[in-house]
Image (cartoon, helix red, strand yellow):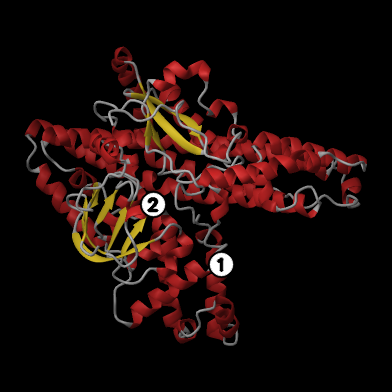
Amino acid sequence: MSSFPSPFEIETPPGAEGWESMYNWYHLFGEDRREADEGKFWFQDALHHPYVIYPYDEIQCECWWQALGGMNTRIFAMPPAFGVEQRILNGRLYVTPVEAPADQVAERAEAFGERAGSYYREWDAIYEGWKEKVAERVALIRSLRFDPLPDREPLETVTSRLGHSVGFRWERDFALMVTTMYETYQWHFELLNIGYAAYLTFFQFCQRAFPGISDQSVSRMVGGLHVDLYRPDDELKRLAKEAERLGVGDVILGQENLTEALRALRNTEAGREWVNDWESTRDPWFHISCDPGHPGGDHRFGTWDDHLEIPYGSVRDYLGKLRAGEAIDRPTEQVLSERDRITAEYRALVGAEDAASFDELVTLARQVFRYIEEHVLYIEHWTWTAFWAKSRELAASLTAMGVLDDPEDLFFLRRTEVTELIFDTVAAWSTGAPGRGRAHFGPIIARRREIFAALEAWQPPPALGPPPTSVSEPLTIMLWGITTDSVSRWLEDGTGGGSDGSLRGIAGSPGVVEGPVRVVRSATELAQVQHGEVLVCPATSPAWAPVFSRIAATVSDVGGIMSHTAIVCREYGLPAVVGTGRAVATLENGQRVRVDGNTGVVTVLDR
């Protein structure tokens, strides 16, 4: 195969006819821009959106589409690239980077130096202020209320001279909630892209100064940092240690059921102290999205706080390790030592004229890298989990009022349709006359449920359109793991595998280990993972952190050298091969594999 299929040649899966109605028109391929779209290379964004996108959840794609482009193109003038175009095809998201015109790169580089430089010089202070303003927006979303509309407003509405109804607040606050997500995603990319740019500048400097240096060697020079992203897992380890200190570890180890364990613990003073600690830790450290793709990108997966068996099981696991005399803390000092060793070795190789540049660039890369990892906690986890929780609260109230049959129905409506449904519901409530929302949207929702199921059964091609002669855009390579080699393998057999059954991907974290496979598709399945197994997954997110103390290595379908999976495995000292394409579909539980995190090869030892 010399080219990927044209997006205009892809057929609609049987039973999914009319799927286009589920998404906004600007997200679709259209005849009016066919010539332009057919000439571009599109790849499926399985890193962030591995599943069919719910109509309501389309807002998440909209947020990052607009914000990334605006910051890159219009505000900071990123020299090599504008934004990233998005299209939805049969419910899956496809993207393509937009390169800056060659004749604009020099001028944009000058502007970028001035604009980004002003941020780099005050990075720490800006970042502290950034965390404060994001926290304020999280608190704002959590403060909104979408309780069922009352039969009659409380007397306080009159005596306080409030002057408007709770129905009005439904309309106002839904709009506020949506625009707040757009706003915080502007802030998300306020620092992210220029943070990546600083890392990429160091990366490119190393490639020029040290021909043949591996991507891993560069990335290991900026790792080993203490970041808040690892705090949720650290809190579970702390709870395990506290259980031992308080002498209640036997109760926890002896009871797999959390409810029964908490009941037993409340019978003693020490147990009550641990329970209080557990409860206070939940907010905010259990507000961690279980989404196996982009954290917070899909409403349905919930958080640790929705699936308390995940953090509780990890506490029990850490207790067992403590009893066995095993270390449970991340090997941060070891990673730092290795970081400093590698940095010193390469620093000694640069000439005197480049030494100052090397020092400046590695220092800045380490400074911005903290944000690159931590922002996920503030935006993708805390902000999005607050948004989804309030969306579910609205859905539950509409169901309780008889407007929807099931809370999940809400997510089969586009956000603009939800606005219409809220207006109709409030108008009917206000006047006491029947509304049309249920009659109007009921058949639409029923049909979209059928379409959604048909789309889920469709196997999307990894890419569309003419393949690039080479993939050189750094973020496409390092974040998504899209490389010239991976595109070539897709063209050859569509799987990225070898004729001997091996899988080739990107060397994400160094080391070589052998072990049995454990395929995991979501955080709710992590309890099945046994010690010494090789985790095979679509991708990982911070919700998966506790499993890294049990596994021998990680193999992921998607991701590059700067994906979460690769970064975390380096921090935990585990081998990783990322961006294999089809590991989840190819490997089976119990198969023995060799994971070579130095070369990016996964070899099946037991067919």
Residue 485 percent coordinates (x, y): 23, 37
Q: Quadrant of the C terminus?
A: bottom left
Element at label 1 = helix
Q: Amino acid at mark 1?
A: Ser
Q: Which residue in the structure is indicated by mark 2?
A: 538
Q: Is residue 588 left or right of residue 361?
A: right
Residue 104 percent coordinates (x, y): 33, 14
Q: Which of the 4 image quarters holds residue 489?
A: top left
Do we see residue 136 in this rendering?
A: no
Element at label 2 = loop
Numbered disc total: 2
Do we see residue 123 in this rendering?
A: yes
Who comes first in sequence, dot 1 or dot 2? Answer: 1
Residue nearer the viewer, 31 or 521:
31
Q: Is residue 347 left or right of residue 467?
A: left
Residue 146 percent coordinates (x, y): 74, 49
Residue 218 percent coordinates (x, y): 20, 43
For image coordinates 28% across by 26% down, the residue present is: 468
Residue nearer the viewer, 97 or 216:
97
Q: Which residue in the structure is indicated by mark 1?
A: 280
**316 lies above or below 559:** below
